[in-house]
Image (cartoon, helix red, strand yellow):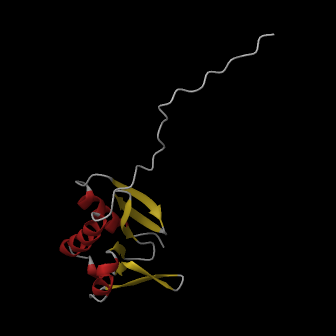
């Protein structure tokens, strides 16, 4: 199943004013990374995956339209799955996105994933004469 392209477009629009946002196809969906950290995913299995952190996990997973995320039989503490009913309205989507943004804002920014160009001069190569 493809991820919800409408939800991805809505997330993209809400994130347009934020710096350091990168989209990556990940886990069968479209992941929105902020500051190098996973913030939310338009899931390939439907709904949204939102990173809320361990401290908020139990509270948010108990909310309507949300549940704990499990992968390979293990609970992914700090992440919740939100059904489409939970973000059908713009206010609902903004609420869930804000939770993801608020959590990743507590994390240190990761260095850019792009390869850095070395500033050291390349060693000179000499040809043997002879």
Where is residue 77 drawn, in percent x and y? 40, 80
Residue under the image location 28 percent in, 83 percent down = 60
| Residue 34 position in % (x across, y down) | 33, 59
Q: With respect to residue 57, does 33 lie above or below?
A: above
Given the current orientation, which residue lies at the most extreme right position?
130
Q: Nearer the viewer, residue 52 or 64?
A: 52
Q: Which image quadrant is residue 105 in? A: bottom left
Residue, x 72% and y 16% (percent of image)? 127
Residue 44: quarter of image: bottom left
Q: Which quadrant, please, contains the C terminus? A: top right
Q: Which of the 4 image quarters holds residue 125? A: top right
Give the answer, above or below, for where 99 lies relative to 19.
below
Task: Depth check: give the residue in front, 25 or 18.
Answer: 18
Tell whether 87 sits left or right of 114: left
Q: Could you tell whether 48 is left or right of 126 in the image?
A: left
Q: Position of residue 121 (x, y in %)?
A: 52, 26
At horizontal 42% and vertical 64% (from top left) the residue drawn is 30
Vertical position of residue 112 compared to residue 100: above or below: above
x and y percentages locating residue 129 in the rendered image: 77, 11
All told, the count of numbered labels is 0
Above or below: residue 26 compared with residue 79: above
- Please identify the residue farthest to the top as the structure is shown: 130
């Amino acid at each position: 199943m493809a991820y919800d392209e409408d939800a991805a477009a809505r997330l993209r629009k809400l994130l347009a004013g934020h710096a350091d946002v990168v989209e990556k196809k990940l886990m069968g969906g479209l992941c929105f990374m902020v500051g190098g950290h996973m913030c939310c995913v338009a899931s390939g299995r439907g709904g949204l995956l939102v990173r809320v952190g361990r401290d908020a996990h139990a509270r948010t997973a108990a909310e309507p339209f949300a549940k704990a995320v499990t992968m390979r039989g293990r609970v992914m503490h700090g992440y919740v799955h939100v059904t489409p009913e939970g973000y059908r309205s713009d206010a609902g989507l903004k609420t869930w996105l804000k939770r993801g943004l608020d959590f990743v804002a507590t994390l240190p920014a990761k260095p850019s994933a792009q390869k850095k160009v070395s500033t050291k001069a390349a060693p000179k190569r000499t040809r043997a004469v002879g």
